[in-house]
Image (cartoon, rainbow, N blue to C red):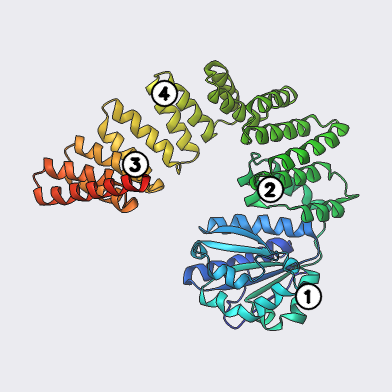
Amino acid sequence: MIRARKSMTSEQPSPKHNKTNPITEGMAELLDELKLSTHWDRPSILMVVFRSKLTMLQAQISLKNKIRRIGQQVKHIRVNQENYDLALHLSERTDTSKTVFFISDLHNGGGLAGLNAFRALNMRRELLVDHSIRVVFWLSEADSTTMMLNAIDFWAFRHRLVELLNSPRENILPGLLHKLSELPWEPQNHTNLAPVDAGQLVALQAELKGVPNAVRFTAWLQISYAATLWADGNFHEAQNQLAALLAEVQITEDVHLQAECLAAIGQVFFSAGDHQSARKVLEKSLELDPKNSTGWLILAKIHHGQQRKTEMNLALERLLVLVPRNSEGWELLGDLQVSSNQMEEAARSYLNAQAGSSKNALVWKKLGDICANTGHLEQAGMYYRKACRLGKRAGDFLKLGEIYQQLNKSGPAIRAYKQAVRLEEFNPVPWEALGKLYRAEKHFRAEIKAFSKAAALAEKAKHSLI
C-alpha cells in the first residue's frame, strides 16, 4: 500500500509514474518534490513510513541513486541522545544547499519514553523552513504513530508522505544483492549507499530468517556493518565481525563469499597499517577466487609501499584484465612507470585513469608534471588548469603560474598566483612568486608590495614556531 499526501505548498504528484511497484512509484514521487525544492531553493520535508527494514533499505538505495543524478549528495543521520535536536543541528550545517538528509531512528533521541527528538522537531520545525533544509524522515510504523501523537504540528508540517506497508520480501533480494555486492568493499561505498549499524543488522537478520536464498544477502549485511565499523576507525571490531562471518560462510562452502570476506579482512589490516598480515590474507583470498579485483588492487598497494615493483606490476596486470576501467589501478600503474622513468607509458596510464573518472585532480596534476618535465608546456598548462578547477589547491595554482611564466604569458601567470594567494593568504610563497613576476615585468610598485607582504608573512611564521 502506498499513499502520498501533500501540504498546501507542495506540487501535485506526476500521473506518469509506474503503478506496478510501490517503491518505484513512491521514490519517484519524492524525487519530483526534491527536484522542485532544489530548483527553487526551498525546504522539503518528506516522510517515508515502512513496515519492513528490507523495504526501507531498497527504498533508500533507489532514492539515493536518483538524488545523485540531480546533483545532490545524501547524508545519513541516525538520531541519538547527542543529536536529537535535529532542526537545530541541521540549521547549523554549511552543506545544506547540496545535501538531502536521510533521518532515521527518531526513537533513540532519549528523554522520557524516547520523545526528545519528536518534541524538538515539533518546537523548532520553522528552522527547517528558514534554512531551506531538504530532509527525508524514515519512520517505522511505531515512530510514525509516536509522531502523530506527540508531534502533531510537525506531522502536519510535511510536504509529502509515502507509506510502504505491503512490499514482498523474497523477490527483492536478488536485485538488492546485485547492487550491493558489485561495490568494491570500501567504507565510502557501503556507508554512503546504505550504512548498517548494529541495531539494523539484528533487525534485518531477524526479518530474513527463513527467507529462501538469503544467505549471501545476510552476509553482505554483515560485511556492510563491518564497513561502518571500519569507517569509524574501529579496525579491531571490524576484523572480529568479518572473522565471525568467515567462520559462518566456510560452512556453506561458498568459495566466492569466503574470498570476499578474506579480501575485506585484508583491507582492514591494510588500513590499520599491518601490511604483512594484509598481504597473507589477500593472497589466501586470491587463491580461492583469482577474480577478486579488490584483492589485486590492495595487494598492488602493499607491493607499492614495499618497493616490490615486479610483484606490483603483476598485481596491476591481473586487476586491469578483470576491470579495464579501474581508475585507481591505472593511476598506480602510472606511478610505477614514473618511478621507472617510463614517462610516455605513464602518461597513457594516467589518461586511462581519467577515462574511468575524470574528476581526480591529482591525476591531472601528475599528467601536467610529466608534460612540464618533458617540455610540453601547453599541454602541461591544460592539465594543470583541470587540476586547479577540481582541487583548488594553492600549490597547483603556483605550478600553473610557473608554467605560464615559461610560456611568457604574464597575465594568466599573475591571475594564477593571485588565486594561490586567495587560497592560502598566510603563505609567503605565492607573494614571493608574484614579486618575482612583477620584477620581471618591471611593475616595481607591485613588486615592492608583494615582497613586503611575503617578508611579513615569513617573519610571522618564524615567530609562531619559536
Q: Residue at x 10, y 48 (%)?
A: 443
Q: Quadrant of the N terminus?
A: bottom right
> Which label is found at residue 396?
3
Determine which residue is flagged by label 4: 338
How much space separates mark 2 and mark 3, taking CA atoms?
34 Å
Residue type (three-letter) at the residue carrying disc 1: Leu
Tell me which corner region of the image, top left, top right, bottom left or bottom right, holds residue 155.
Answer: bottom right
Q: Residue at x 70, y 35 (%)?
A: 264
Helix, strand or loop status at disc 3: helix
Above or below residue 234? Residue 273 is above
Residue type (three-letter) at the residue carrying disc 4: Val
Residue 148, image x, y percentages: 75, 79
Helix, strand or loop status at disc 2: helix
Above or below residue 188? Residue 107 is below
Above or below residue 175? Residue 320 is above
Determine which residue is flagged by label 2: 228
In terms of depth relative to the viewer, which is nearer, 361 or 434?
434
Determine which residue is flagged by label 1: 112
Relative placement, left or right, of 164 versus 71 is: right
Callout 2 touching callout 4 (CB < 8 Å): no
Tell me which corner region of the image, top left, top right, bottom left or bottom right, holds residue 253.
Answer: top right
Assess disc 4: are there few (<14), some (14-19) or many (≥20) residues with their C-alpha within 10 Å of its C-alpha: some
Q: Which residue is drawn at 47% across and 37% down?
A: 355
In terms of depth relative to the viewer, which is nearer, 167 or 61?
61
How much space separates mark 4 and mark 1, taking CA atoms?
63 Å
